[in-house]
Amino acid sequence: MARPKIPRQICGTPAQSCFKPNGIPMSQLDTITLQADEFEALRLVDYQGMQQQVAAVEMGVSRQTLANLVKAARRKVSDCLLHGKALVMSEASAAPEANASSPVEQRRLKD
């Protein structure tokens, strides 16, 4: 029996829901979907410059899970850039609750 999936803390959302090559209609492009947890891992590690261990705590996952998410996200973004595909962000179903705070923030408030 597989282990249940740990809920992930996702605090960032993309500014746009889709990125595509200029001048090519969406109907003519292959699309790749970037999941919300992959976007969050990429945001924390690559954009904010967090170390993977710190980012993993922020998301509420193991360091290895975070590394797998970052690897998958980088591969998808690279594929889109190299092969002219559209990058579509996953729907809001995986988005955080309005008042969700990270495990780090919850511990800070508790102290």
Image (spheres, rainbow, N blue to C red):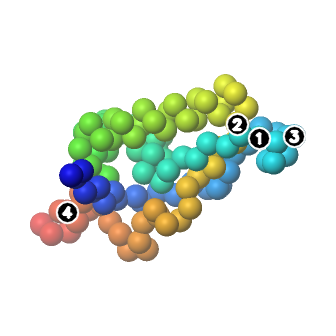
- Left or right: 23 as drawn, with respect to 12: right
Please determine whether, in this image, residue 94 is positioned above or below residue 50: below
Circle 2 packing at 10 Å, graded few (<14), some (14-19), many (20+), is: many
75 or 60, which lies in front?
Answer: 75
Name the residue rendered at 63%, 49% in the picture.
88
Circle nearer the N terminus (2, 1): 1
Callout 1 amino acid: Leu
Name the residue rendered at 67%, 43% in the picture.
31
Callout 3 amino acid: Gly
Tag 3 residue: 23
To which quarter of the image does residue 48 belong? top left
> Cα distance, mark 3 to mark 1?
11 Å
> Cα distance, mark 3 to mark 2?
12 Å
Residue 96 bears which disc, if any? none
Name the residue rendered at 66%, 30% in the picture.
81
2 or 108, which lies in front?
Answer: 2
Tag 2 residue: 85
Q: Residue 40, percent across and down?
A: 44, 49
Residue 108 bears which disc, if any? 4
> Cα distance, mark 4 to mark 1?
46 Å
Q: Residue 38, percent across and down?
A: 45, 46
Between disc 4 and disc 1, the foreground one is 1
